[in-house]
Amino acid sequence: MEFATLLKPEAVKVLTSASSKKRLMQDIGDLAQSVYDLNAGEVVDALNTRESLGPTGVGHGVALPHARLDGLSEVVGAFVLLDKPIDFSSVDRQPVDIAFALFAPQDAGVEHLKALALVSRTLRDPSICTKLRANPDAGTLYTILTEEKSVQAA
């Protein structure tokens, strides 16, 4: 599994509007609707339902919200860089400025877990997060994410 199969270039966005976790979830839902033709309301509900089980803020300013959705045939993702960090109830209590949302079919099984592991492993690397934070351009962010995957696989 590679980032390029999970993430469309147009599913990478720099957000200036997210001032809360609730607003970020709505922005992710809107992005999923525009890029993957998913229902924004269903996406937000599914992300919030998953979030109620435990926060997906994994620490060091990174969140990995994820959900299973009807109507998907493959695992897809959306990457968001926030210009201002927000509280995300993360495990280390640090505000979040990087969010990678994953959406999986209801019956995705191991593919969902593989995608989550790939994203988690990549965004645990401080040098990758530093590069992402230093490049507030969606095209550059996509390139960093898709190129870093080939390095990670080695």
Image (spheres, grey):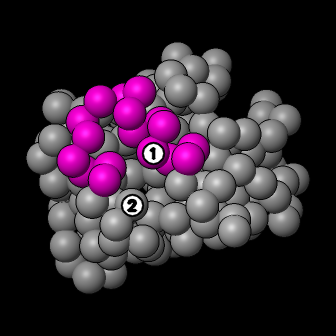
The amino acid type found where label 1 is placed reads Ile
Disc 2 target residue: 128
> Dot 1: few (<14), some (14–19), or many (≥20) neighbours within 10 Å?
some
**Quarter occupied by residue 71:** top right
**Residue at the (64%, 47%) spot, across then down:** 3
For the point 19% across and 73% down, the residue is 94
Please indicate, yes or no, whether residue 46 appears anywhere in the rendered image: no
Residue 120 sits above or below residue 70 on the image: below
As drawn, the residue found furthest toward the bottom would be 92
Of the image marks 2 and 1, the number of the one nearer the N terminus? 2
For the C terminus, the quadrant is bottom right
Residue 70 placement, left or right of 123 = right
- Residue depicted at 78% across the width and 34% down the height: 72
* Visible residue check, residue 150: yes
Whole-percent x and y of residue 13?
37, 31
Residue 10 image offset from top left, x and y in percent: 50, 22
Q: Which residue is mark 1?
A: 144
| Contact (Cβ within 8 Å) of mark 2 with mark 1 | yes
Report whether 118 appears left or right of 128.
Answer: right
Q: Amino acid at mark 2?
A: Ile
Q: Is residue 35 above or below residue 154?
A: above
